[in-house]
C-alpha cells in the first residue's frame, strides 16, 4: 500500500477503489515507513506550522493517536498547547492513512473534534483568538450567542471546543455530547492545567471532580491530562478522578536549567529587599529587566506598589504621570478586567511596564517569554504553586532568576506546605529539591554549580572559575578570520584577551561594592554578569564591535554594556 500526494489531493492506492482526501501535501510515502511522522508533518503543514515539535510533545501526540489515555507532565514553557492544536487534523489524517478499509470513498469531513477543559475564562478567550488567527476554527463555550456558530458546533464543524468544567456539565453542552456527531467524532478530551483537578475539585470548583463522568458519556474519546507540576501522589489522585485507569505517562524533568534559584530570610523592611529593583527602574527605565513580584495577599501588593511610588516619584513614569505610563503595575483578582488585559499585553510587548506586583491571579495563561526575575515576597503556600510561578521566568531560554524572600511567619506550620518550607530553609541545592520532588526518577546532580545561592557558595567546577588559558589562540584567530565571511570579525591576540579579562574582573569587583548595601543578592544574580559571562565575552570578543552586540547576546543593562564596550575599545584601539 502506498500514498501519492499532489498539490491538492492525497490518493490512497490500496488495490481497492482509490480514496481521495482533500489535503495539500507534496510527497510520496511508502505506508510502511514512519506513518506517524508523515501524518504529523501533514497536519503541521496544513496549518502552516513551521515549529519543530519536541520529543515529549511528539510522544504525547503519538500515544493519543494510539487511543491511549495520556498524562503529560511537561516543564513550564514547553509548549503544551501545541499538542492539542494539531490533534483534530492529525486524528483524521492518521486514521485515513492507517485504516483505509473503513474510509468512505469520498470524505466530506476533514477533521475530528476535541474538547479542551481549562480553568480560566481569560485563558480560553486568548486561546480562541490564537487558534482562529492560525486558521483553526475554535469556540469558547461560555456566553455563546452566535447562532451560526452554535449551529456549526452542533453539527460538529468546529474542531476545537474550549470550556470550563462548569459549562461542560450545564444542560446544553452536556446534551451536545450525547448526539450522534459527537459520539462518532469526538476524539479526545484534553484537561489543561490538570493539577487544578486535585487542587480545586474538592474545594470551590467541584465540577472538576465530575470530569470522570465523561468516560460513560463519550466512551470512545481518549483523555489527555497536561500539567507542569505533579507528584506521583497527585498524578494518582488526578488519574483516579478523571477515570484514567490505565494511561501512558509522558514526563519530562521539571528542571529549568536557565533559572538560577535564590532564597533568603528577610525582615518586612521593603527597602532592604527591593531597593535594587527600584534602582534598576530609575537607572534603566524601559530597559529595566521584566520582573514579576508575587505577594501572598493584596495588602502586600499595595504596600510594595506604594513603596515604589514613594521611592521613584516622577521617575515612576515615562511622560505624563498616569497609570499607562507607569513603569510598574499592580495585578490581583479585583483589578478591572480591562486593566488586567492591558497589563498582560504591555508586559508581552517591549513597552513601558517593566514590573508587575501581583497575587497568584497573575498566573495561568500568562506567557511572557522574557521575564528575567520572578520574586516571591513571602514563601508560596505550596511548592507546586512556587514551581508554576517561578517557571514564568526565562521562557525564552535566557538566564533568569527566581528570588524567594521569606519571613519567619511564612515557614511556620500551616503557613506553607512542608516541601516549600524545606526549600526555603535548606542549605543544599535548591534546584535539586525541586527536581527530586516533581521528577524523582531524574538523577540528582552530584556536581556543585552556581544554579542557586547555596551552590554558589560551594561551587568549584571549572565552568565557574576564570580560566586564564581558555582563550582562542593567535593561530586559531588567524584561521577564523580567514574562513568567517558571514559576519564582521576582527583579530584579537591572546595578550589583548587577557587584558580585557582582567579589566572585566575589576569592573565586576566595583559592581559588587556598588550593590553591597542594596541587597542580599550577589552581584551576578543582580546583573546576570557572572564569571562565565566574562569568559563568554572574552572568547567572542572578535565579534563584538558595538553596544548592540553585547546587549543582543550577553547583558541586558545598558549601563553595564557601556562599561564593557569602553573596556574593549580601550584595549583594542
Image (tube, grey):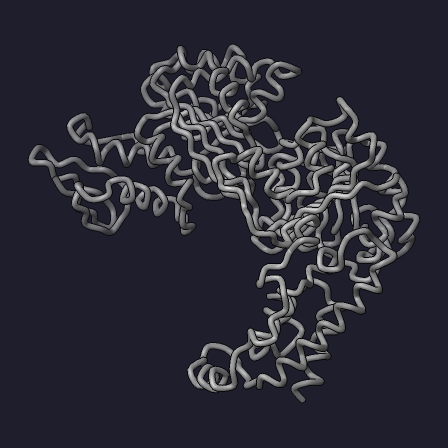
Which is nearer the eye, 462 or 566?
A: 462
Which is nearer the eye, 332 or 196?
A: 196
Residue 560 place in picture, x, y as percent: 74, 68
| Residue at far bottom of view | 573
Answer yes or no: is residue 346 visible.
Answer: no
214 relative position to 565: left or right: left
Which is nearer the eye, 518 or 144?
A: 518
Residue 564 place in picture, x, y as percent: 70, 74
385 relative position to 302: left or right: left
Seen at 64% across and 44% down, the residue is 429
Q: Which picture quadrant has residue 427?
A: top right
209 relative position to 430: left or right: left
Identify the image quadrant of the C terminus: bottom right
The image shows residue 161, relative to residue 362, as above or below, that is above
Answer yes or no: is residue 319 visible.
Answer: yes
Residue 446 place in picture, x, y as percent: 55, 48
187 relative position to 274: left or right: left
Identify the image quadrant of the N terminus: top left
Picture mark count: 0
Q: Which picture quadrant has residue 58?
A: top left
Residue 325 place in picture, x, y as percent: 80, 51
Seen at 41% across and 51% down, the residue is 50
Q: Which picture quadrant has residue 498?
A: bottom right
Amino acid at each position: 500500500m502506498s500514498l501519492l500526494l499532489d498539490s491538492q489531493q492525497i490518493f490512497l492506492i490500496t488495490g481497492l477503489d482509490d480514496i481521495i482526501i482533500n489535503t495539500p501535501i507534496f510527497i510520496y510515502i511508502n505506508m510502511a515507513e514512519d506513518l506517524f511522522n508523515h501524518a504529523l508533518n501533514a497536519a503541521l503543514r496544513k496549518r502552516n506550522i513551521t515549529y519543530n515539535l519536541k520529543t515529549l510533545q511528539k510522544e504525547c501526540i503519538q500515544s493519543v493517536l494510539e487511543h491511549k489515555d495520556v498524562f503529560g507532565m511537561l516543564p513550564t514553557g514547553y509548549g503544551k498547547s501545541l499538542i492539542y492544536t494539531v490533534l483534530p487534523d492529525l486524528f483524521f489524517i492518521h486514521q485515513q492513512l492507517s485504516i483505509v478499509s473503513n474510509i468512505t470513498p469520498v470524505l466530506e469531513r476533514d477533521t475530528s473534534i476535541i474538547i479542551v477543559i481549562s480553568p480560566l475564562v481569560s485563558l480560553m478567550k486568548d486561546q480562541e483568538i490564537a487558534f482562529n488567527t492560525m486558521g483553526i476554527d475554535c469556540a469558547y463555550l461560555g456566553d455563546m450567542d452566535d447562532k451560526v456558530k452554535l449551529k456549526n458546533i452542533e453539527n460538529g464543524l468546529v474542531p476545537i471546543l474550549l470550556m470550563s468544567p462548569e459549562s461542560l456539565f450545564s444542560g446544553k453542552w452536556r446534551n451536545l455530547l450525547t448526539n450522534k456527531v459527537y459520539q462518532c467524532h469526538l476524539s479526545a478530551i484534553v484537561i489543561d492545567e490538570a493539577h487544578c483537578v486535585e487542587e480545586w475539585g474538592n474545594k470551590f470548583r467541584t465540577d472538576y471532580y465530575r470530569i470522570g463522568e465523561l468516560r460513560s458519556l463519550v466512551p470512545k474519546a481518549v483523555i489527555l491530562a497536561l500539567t507542569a507540576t505533579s507528584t506521583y501522589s497527585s498524578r494518582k489522585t488526578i488519574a483516579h478522578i478523571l477515570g484514567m485507569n490505565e494511561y501512558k505517562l509522558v514526563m519530562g524533568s521539571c528542571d529549568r536549567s536557565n533559572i538560577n534559584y535564590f532564597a533568603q530570610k528577610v525582615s518586612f523592611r521593603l527597602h532592604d529587599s527591593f531597593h535594587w529593583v527600584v534602582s534598576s527602574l530609575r537607572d534603566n527605565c524601559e530597559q529595566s529587566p521584566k520582573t514579576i513580584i508575587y505577594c501572598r495577599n493584596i495588602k502586600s501588593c499595595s504596600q510594595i506598589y506604594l513603596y515604589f511610588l514613594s521611592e521613584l516619584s516622577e521617575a515612576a513614569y515615562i511622560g505624563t504621570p498616569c497609570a499607562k505610563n507607569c513603569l510598574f503595575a499592580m495585578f490581583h483578582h479585583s483589578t478591572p478586567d480591562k486593566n488586567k488585559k492591558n497589563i498582560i499585553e504591555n508586559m508581552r510587548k517591549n513597552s513601558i511596564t517593566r514590573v508587575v506586583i501581583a497575587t497568584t491571579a497573575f498566573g495561568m495563561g500568562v506567557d511572557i517569554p522574557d521575564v528575567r526575575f520572578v520574586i516571591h515576597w513571602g514563601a508560596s503556600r505550596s511548592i507546586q504553586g512556587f514551581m508554576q510561578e517561578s517557571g514564568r521566568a526565562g521562557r525564552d531560554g535566557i538566564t533568569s532568576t527566581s528570588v524567594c524572600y521569606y519571613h519567619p511567619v511564612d515557614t511556620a506550620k500551616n503557613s506553607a506546605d512542608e516541601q516549600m518550607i524545606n526549600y526555603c530553609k535548606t542549605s543544599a541545592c535548591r534546584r535539586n529539591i525541586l527536581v527530586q520532588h516533581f521528577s524523582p526518577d531524574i538523577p540528582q546532580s552530584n556536581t556543585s554549580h552556581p544554579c542557586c545561592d547555596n551552590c554558589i557558595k560551594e561551587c568549584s567546577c571549572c565552568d565557574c572559575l576564570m580560566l586564564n588559558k581558555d582563550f582562542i589562540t593567535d593561530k586559531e584567530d588567524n584561521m577564523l578570520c580567514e574562513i568567517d565571511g558571514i559576519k564582521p570579525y576582527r583579530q584579537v591576540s591572546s595578550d589583548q584577551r587577557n587584558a580585557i579579562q582582567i579589566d572585566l574582573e575589576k569592573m565586576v569587583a566595583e559592581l559588587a561594592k556598588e550593590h553591597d548595601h542594596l541587597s542580599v543578592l550577589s552581584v551576578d544574580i543582580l546583573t546576570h554578569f557572572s564569571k562565565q559571562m566574562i569568559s563568554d565575552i572574552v572568547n567572542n570578543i572578535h565579534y563584538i564591535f558595538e553596544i548592540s552586540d553585547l546587549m543582543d547576546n550577553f547583558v541586558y543593562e545598558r549601563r553595564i554594556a557601556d562599561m564593557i564596550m569602553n573596556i574593549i575599545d580601550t584595549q583594542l584601539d
